[in-house]
Image: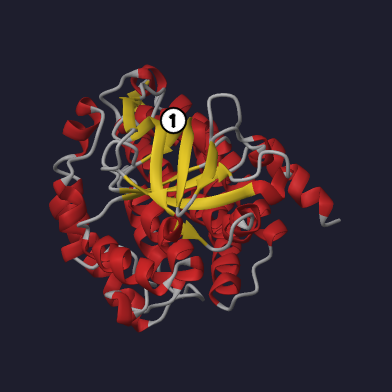
């Protein structure tokens, strides 16, 4: 179970909220996980239930339908869903897209979309990655050409979380293809716009229940009022918001790491080999002792990062370090835990197999481990 006792970022209000999240997980997530995994997508109605339970966008100000809480509440949702093995796009909506609209949206954009995002009526996505462009956001090729009082958008995006269910996309596009980073703008694109097409739900190694899609834009016209922040200011906005995204990934990685450890402790104590429990072999105990130590240190570091972020002090380099460390740790822990399961660990019916598969992408999305090292190195 996610450790809660004495954790510095959390107070009594957080504890009450965590209990509410755990009840929601027991009621709405755990009974459906296997079905969602097989279907390759989470039910659209899950978003409405999450909204009704108060799990969506807790930091959104009250005047726009939110609870106006601190980021610690987001972190609790991230931890508990990760521990439950739920790879929904809730984290993206609460930790990423909502903050873009709060920080850069016009009053009309905020009042139109934020209440619907909080309730689950609207599902959002952010579209940065393209078939030929990953971490290098300056090299995107999707264009938004100004024609009078509208932008005409052409291009394609891929690996987009919430792509199938989305009602609104925050699109990174070039409004000036010759200006490099200064030519990138963020534009809100409603999913019912003519020329907007949702491609296939992508077949992934892991996180099968996650809605991950291709998106296509063929002469999609949106009003200039759909511009988020100023023209040419998209790259700066992306760089400003990425630290919270990377912290959220680190939080999820710790939740998954804890789950892998807990599963493995239970398995090794029950599984027999050569007349004794697998746990009773010194090698097993030493590996688990090592993992327990890494988790203890990991949670302490994560709490430090969450507390700094709540105070508005977490730097880009620190967030990148958190993302790098905790996702690499997750992959090491799940690999060791799968090994302690023996042959059972390679069977999909055992949860450790899913955790091991799902872990791999965390070292890629939100910026690869290699990009994290580049970001961190620049701060030295």
Q: Quadrant of residue 266?
A: top left
Where residue 34 appears, as percent x and y from the top left, is 20, 33
Identify the residue at horizontal 61%, vertical 35% (top origin).
140
Q: Judge left or right: residue 317 versus residue 266.
A: right
**Quarter of the picture holding the N terminus:** bottom left
Q: Nearer the viewer, residue 81 or 341?
A: 81
Where residue 275 appears, as percent x and y from the top left, is 34, 23
Identify the residue at horizontal 72%, vertical 39% (top origin).
178
Query: Residue tagged by mark 1?
Result: 356
Q: Nearer the viewer, residue 312 or 122?
A: 122
| Extreme-right residue of the structure | 380
Q: Judge left or right: residue 35 versus residue 357.
A: left
Where residue 312 appears, as percent x and y from the top left, is 60, 75
Q: Judge left or right: residue 180 versus residue 324.
A: right
Is residue 1 shown to the viewer in this render?
A: no
The colour scheme applied to this rendered structure is: secondary structure
Q: Nearer the viewer, residue 61 or 293?
A: 61
Where residue 299 appears, as percent x and y from the top left, is 53, 60
Q: Nearer the viewer, residue 187 or 312?
A: 187
Q: How many marks?
A: 1
Q: Secondary structure at mark 1?
A: helix
| Extreme-front residue of the structure | 148
Identify the residue at horizontal 34%, vertical 42% (top origin).
162
């Amino acid at each position: 179970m996610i450790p809660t006792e004495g954790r510095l970022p959390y107070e009594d209000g957080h504890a009450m909220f965590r209990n509410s999240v755990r009840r929601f997980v027991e009621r709405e997530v755990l009974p459906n996980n296997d079905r969602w995994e097989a279907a390759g997508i989470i039910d659209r109605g899950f978003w409405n239930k999450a909204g009704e339970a108060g799990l969506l966008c807790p930091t959104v100000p009250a005047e726009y339908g939110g609870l106006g809480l601190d980021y610690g509440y987001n972190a609790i949702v991230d931890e508990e869903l990760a521990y439950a093995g739920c790879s929904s796009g809730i984290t993206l909506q609460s930790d990423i897209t909502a903050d873009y609209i709060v920080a850069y949206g016009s009053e009309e954009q905020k009042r139109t979309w934020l209440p619907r995002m909080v309730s689950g009526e609207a599902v959002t996505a952010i579209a940065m990655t393209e078939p030929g462009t990953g971490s290098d956001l300056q090299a995107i090729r999707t264009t938004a050409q100004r024609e009078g009082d509208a932008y005409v958008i052409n291009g394609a995006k891929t690996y987009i979380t919430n792509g199938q269910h989305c009602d609104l996309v925050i699109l990174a596009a070039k409004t000036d293809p010759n200006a490099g980073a200064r030519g990138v703008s963020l534009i809100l694109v409603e999913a019912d716009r003519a020329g907007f097409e949702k491609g296939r739900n992508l077949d992934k190694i892991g996180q099968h229940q996650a809605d991950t899609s291709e998106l296509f834009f063929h002469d999609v016209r949106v009003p200039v009022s759909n511009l988020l922040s100023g023209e040419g200011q998209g790259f700066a906005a992306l760089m400003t918001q990425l630290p919270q995204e990377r912290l959220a990934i680190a939080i999820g990685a710790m939740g998954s790491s804890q789950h892998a450890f807990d599963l493995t402790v239970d398995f090794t104590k029950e599984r027999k080999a050569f007349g004794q429990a697998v746990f009773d072999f010194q090698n097993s105990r030493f590996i688990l002792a090592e993992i327990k130590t890494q988790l203890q240190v990991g949670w302490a570091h994560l709490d430090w990062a969450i507390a700094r972020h709540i105070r508005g002090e977490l730097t880009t380099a620190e967030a990148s370090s958190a993302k790098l460390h905790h996702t690499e740790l997750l992959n090491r822990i799940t690999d060791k835990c799968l090994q302690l399961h023996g042959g059972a660990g390679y069977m999909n019916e055992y949860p450790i197999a899913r955790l091991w598969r799902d872990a791999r992408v965390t070292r890629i999305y939100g910026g690869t481990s290699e990009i994290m090292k580049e970001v961190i190195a620049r701060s030295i």
